[in-house]
Image (spheres, rainbow, N blue to C red):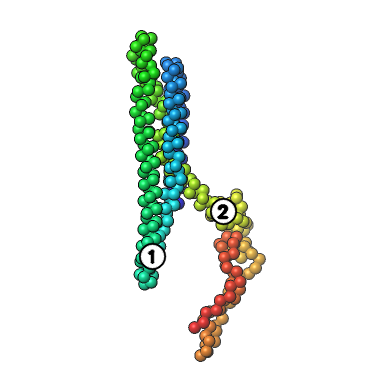
Amino acid sequence: RITEDVRTFTAFSLQLFIELARSMIDLVSFSFILYSIQPQLFATIIGYAAFGTVTTSLLGRSLLPLNFLKLRTEADLRYLLVRIRENAESIAFYGGEDVEGKEVSTRLRKVVDNKREINVKQRNLELFTTCYNYFVQIVPVAVVAPQYFAGSIQLGVISQSVGAFNHILNDLSVIVNDFEQLSSFSAGIERLSTFLTAMRDADPSRSSEDTLLALPAEFNATSIDDEPVKEEAEISNESIQLNLQEMPFTNGDNVLMQINQLRLNTPDRNRVLIDSLDLTIRE
């Protein structure tokens, strides 16, 4: 799921950048044309686009937390289903079908309720954007029609004004046209940011200049001959010893394995997982 979020982030980022660049070029070109033909219509399109952007943001502002909650509820449900599949034998042996079934129903209900709320918000947003796009055919004609009937402009000027109006409005309506994708994109960024923050908090000793999953620089040193330095020399001055001793067999208390003062670190040696563990396994 994380890889899917990363792929969506990179793909949509590129798509958004290209769309914004194209819109800026198109906006500059047709703004001069429309302003030279009908300055009044140019002011109208700015107000119309601002109205559409503000209204769309108000109608769809709740989509961001809903999309973030959607990712969380779906992830919880997938995790539970995978856990049940992997532990199906144990669940059947201990008779845990009812408990697991109730938990699945609860998490599935959360997914369905969240999707229902998203559908309601998307319905309202789509209704507005549809009306917003249809009124584009009426607004420019309504603005320049009085001048045409007064005989001050020709019919061809109206066609030119409508064409330039549609181009500019499409350029200014990036948020209106792509608001649903932008909300999903923002939810994905929030999810990735939360994951990155959790990874950093789990390893606070790591430098912010190091990559997230790579070993710190001091653990990546190599020797002069470009051969990897021995791990014991890089990590610690203490030697790692493993003593295996065969325990004598007696009819009494048989010791199968004994561990004294076990210390277990993460691969990069930044955190201690187990320290000073004593363990004895008897027959």
Q: Position of residue 241 (x, y in %)?
A: 60, 73
Q: Position of residue 32 (x, y in %)?
A: 46, 19
* Front in this rendered view, residue 211 or 201: 201
Q: Is residue 99 visible?
A: yes
Which numbered circle lies on residue 76? Answer: none
Q: Which residue is located at x 43 percent, y 26 percent?
A: 48
Q: How far apart are the alpha carbons under marks 2 and 1?
A: 35 Å
Image vertical order of residue 165 relative to residue 149, above or below = below
Which quarter of the picture shows residue 149? top left
Image vertical order of residue 28 relative to residue 247, above or below = above
Q: Which residue is located at x 36 percent, y 43 percent?
A: 119
Q: Is residue 50 left or right of residue 116?
A: right
Task: Identify which amino acid the numbered label 1 is placed on.
Answer: Val
Q: Which residue is most to the top?
A: 151
Q: Secondary structure at mark 1?
A: helix
* Front in this rendered view, residue 217 or 165: 165
Q: Which residue is located at x 65 percent, y 68 percent?
A: 238
Q: Which residue is located at x 40 percent, y 29 percent?
A: 170
* Front in this rendered view, residue 267 or 233: 267
Which of the two labelled residues, at mark 2 and mark 1, occupies the earlier sequence position? 1
The residue singled out by tag 1 in the image is 99
The residue singled out by tag 2 in the image is 200
* Front in this rendered view, residue 85 or 135: 135
Task: Identify which amino acid the numbered label 2 is placed on.
Answer: Arg
Which quarter of the picture shows residue 79? bottom left
